[in-house]
Amino acid sequence: MPFAAELCDGHANLVDRLITHPFLVELAAGTLPHACFRRFLEQDLYILAEEAKVFAVTASRAPTLAEAARLAALIDQLNVDEHSRHRVLLEHVGGAPDAAEFVPLPTTYAYANHLHARATDGHRVTVLAALLPCAHLYSQFGRRYVDAAPADPIYKTWLRAYQDGNLDPYIATHAQALDDAAAAAGEADRAAARQAFAISLHYEQGFLDMACYGEAWRWAGDGGSDAPVG
């Protein structure tokens, strides 16, 4: 079995639970409070930017120019398009945050640091495995809610991007790059990649919890003003 398929199949039960998370169920039904969606978009903008940096580091270490080009293309295929779409939708729920004042919430910050840590000390297979769960989760979400048509036009627009298979070309390219990296990796690196994939799924659940129920830094309630330093 290809390595990417092994990772996805091995965590299919968890992904099934995640796509029935209250945040996604309410979004598909059009009943999610806009404040929750705004929090999701704001925090995801940060994650998308950090993912792009991690992809760039990984591309810089590619063994061939063709592989570097393939990895660089993934940034444009997913991150750039989704980043633009988030900013447009944010204008309908209160506007994008001021970049100079924005502070990622704890789960967002931890997720980004997990990705950067894999890029710093991991084999290419580990980094690509850590980056795959997000797209995989929302691809499965789009399939589960392919017929959903929320009355709220904001949610309908966001949902459409996942319902019409837009992620499929990206996932195919990412999965092939991961499979190729796994073939060139040793068993220790493949084991680290399996762990990185699982950790990212853990953070995907935390991210949905954060978006749905809110989250705050402890210092934020004590009059503190210093943002965390990466």
Image: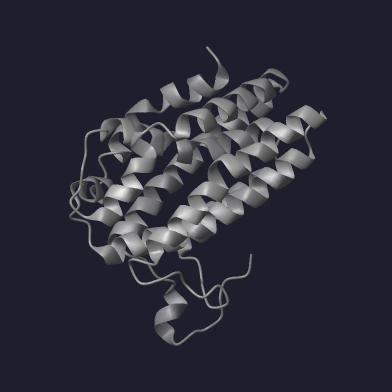
Looking at the image, how many numbered discs can be counted on the residues? Answer: 0
Indicate the position of residue 205 as horizontal and vertical percent values: 37, 46
Residue drawn 53% across and 33% down?
Answer: 170
Pick the front one: 218 or 229:
229
Pick the front one: 227 or 66:
66
Q: Quadrant of residue 176?
A: top right
Please tell me whether residue 216 is drawn above or below residue 118 in the rendered image.
Answer: below
Residue drawn 37% across and 64% down?
Answer: 39
Indicate the position of residue 174 as horizontal and vertical percent values: 58, 30
Q: In which quarter of the image is residue 183?
A: top right
Q: Is residue 155 visible?
A: yes
Q: Is residue 63 visible?
A: no
Please tell me whether residue 158 is drawn above or below residue 219 in the rendered image.
Answer: above
Residue 25 located left or right of residue 77: left
Residue drawn 61% across and 32% down?
Answer: 192
Indicate the position of residue 50 as horizontal and vertical percent values: 60, 54
Point out the image quarter for the C terminus.
bottom right
Pick the front one: 24 or 142:
142
Residue drawn 55% across and 72% down?
Answer: 99
Residue 70 located left or right of residue 213: right
Determine the residue located farthest toward the top in the rendered image.
Answer: 1
Indicate the position of residue 160 as horizontal and vertical percent values: 33, 42
